[in-house]
Image (cartoon, rainbow, N blue to C red):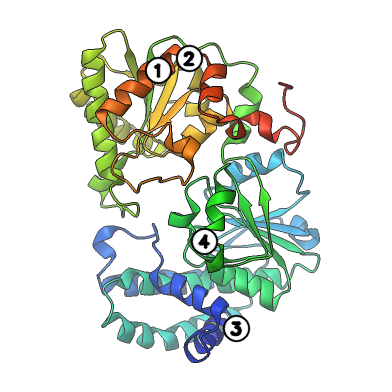
Amino acid sequence: MAIGYLFQIFYKAILFRAREENIILQDLLNKFTYRYVESQRSSFSILFIFARIAIKNCFYPAYIKDDTVAKVATSLVFDSKYEKENRDRYLAYLSIGPYAYLSRNHCFFRLPFYKSLSISIQLLLLFPFLLLMALFRKNRGNLGLLSLELVEASLLISQVKKMPMLRKVYLFSAYEKDCSFLSYILMRKFKLEVQLVPSSNPLRIHYKKGVCTTLTFTTAYHPAEFEKIKSNWVYTNTENWPPFGYEEVIPRLATYDEPPPCTIGYFSSGNWLREKLGRLSYVPFEREAEKMLMQHLHTYLAKHPGFSLIIFLHPLEKRGEQRLVESENYYRSYFGADVQFAPFDTNSVSCFDLVDIGIAIYSSTIFQRLFAGQKSLFAPYSMQADYFTDKTIEAISIRSYEQLEFLIQETAKQSPAEYFSRYKLQDYTWKSFSKLVKPAMPTA
């Protein structure tokens, strides 16, 4: 199973310095992950926690009741269990044909007891080596997570073996550190095509290296950015797809009202809450950037009383009644008791036309706004210079209060057509994808 493949990869990477295997091993042992919190990063206990979960998953994976589709599917979409509805909506307008959906720790077909036992025994035999390695590593969380990733890979392998018609696998959540490992197994051992579908975040930060058949670009700056890092990739070809969330925009293109003038939408990334919850942060200075953006918006609104602010909460900030109240209080304590919020019971895309200008540090929601033809600004501040490696995006990226004031003032004067022409952002709008997305979108 997956543990055997891991030893093959380790052998080739260490003894022969094989390029493909070396990429996989580096990712498994070093790549950033969101699957544990900061306090667990250096803890020995995380190894035991993940090992316990992994063994439990060997014997009690979650089963999908109807395996009919899986038996005849030629394509498989693989992602987390929370993303199925999102991926179904995203793929509905793209011509990839029928597919089966499988998530981590889920199975179409039941595993024989002996196979579950075999996986768990192999895992127990591996565990002392992980403990030994943990003595010499600060990031013990990655080693602990490896136990769970190997079980999840083994479950995927067992399902793929029972899908005789399968020809292609679409891997979403391409930022996961085991993504190249899964791709390698599917490509080299099962001779399947593997297409990675990353988000619109920068490839050079979240997807520095990888192994796949096809890498998908989901924003206009990806192709040029990839030219600078493609030597770290093993791939055959690339494809251009629209950004995540475009499918929520398409049905609303004809229904958006003209936004009221002098209105600013702050699209939160919830970094204050992530910090409070002990969540890991990968992008340098992202939390400082969001604090700076809030501070500068507060200053701007005090200086320009003709402008108003509406806060669009991140889904994390709305998860549960208690957390929602906490989030409201946090922003009211900062911007005042009368600060306005976008409706809590709907997503941000439904309310894009509430504001004339949308601002976030680097939220994918801003790419949705650009796709919708809505005026938008980024505010990366002290984050990496030229964060998006695109001069057009950098031109609407805020690095200081003076720049925030200038860009808001200038953007407020422009019509959407003038804004997109002035900053040469046409490639980010729905019009540039009208031939790819089916059914056809409105004509220009």
The one nearer the camera, 15 or 325, is 15
- Between disc 2 and disc 3, the foreground one is 2
Q: To which quarter of the image does residue 441 belong?
A: top right
* In contact (CB < 8 Å): disc 2 and disc 1: yes
In the picture of the structure, the residue carrying the numbered disc 3 is 114
Disc 1, SS: helix
Q: Earlier in the sequence, mark 2 or mark 3?
A: 3
The one nearer the camera, 214 or 85, is 214
* In contact (CB < 8 Å): disc 2 and disc 4: no
Q: Residues within 10 Å of mark 3 (few under 14, many from 20)?
A: few
Tell me if I can see residue 103 in this picture. Answer: yes
Percent across and percent down for residue 284 are 30, 52
Percent across and percent down for residue 29 are 40, 74
In the picture of the structure, the residue carrying the numbered disc 1 is 410
Left or right: residue 216 versus residue 39 is right
In the picture of the structure, the residue carrying the numbered disc 4 is 229
| Circle 2: residue type | Gln
| Circle 4: residue type | Ile
Q: Quadrant of the N terminus?
A: bottom right
Is 210 drawn above or below residue 435 in the view shown?
Answer: below
Is 59 drawn above or below residue 414 in the view shown?
Answer: below
In the picture of the structure, the residue carrying the numbered disc 2 is 414
Left or right: residue 21 versus residue 312 is right
Q: Earlier in the sequence, mark 4 or mark 3?
A: 3
| Circle 1: residue type | Glu
Percent across and percent down for residue 167 are 77, 64
Disc 2, SS: loop
Disc 4, SS: loop
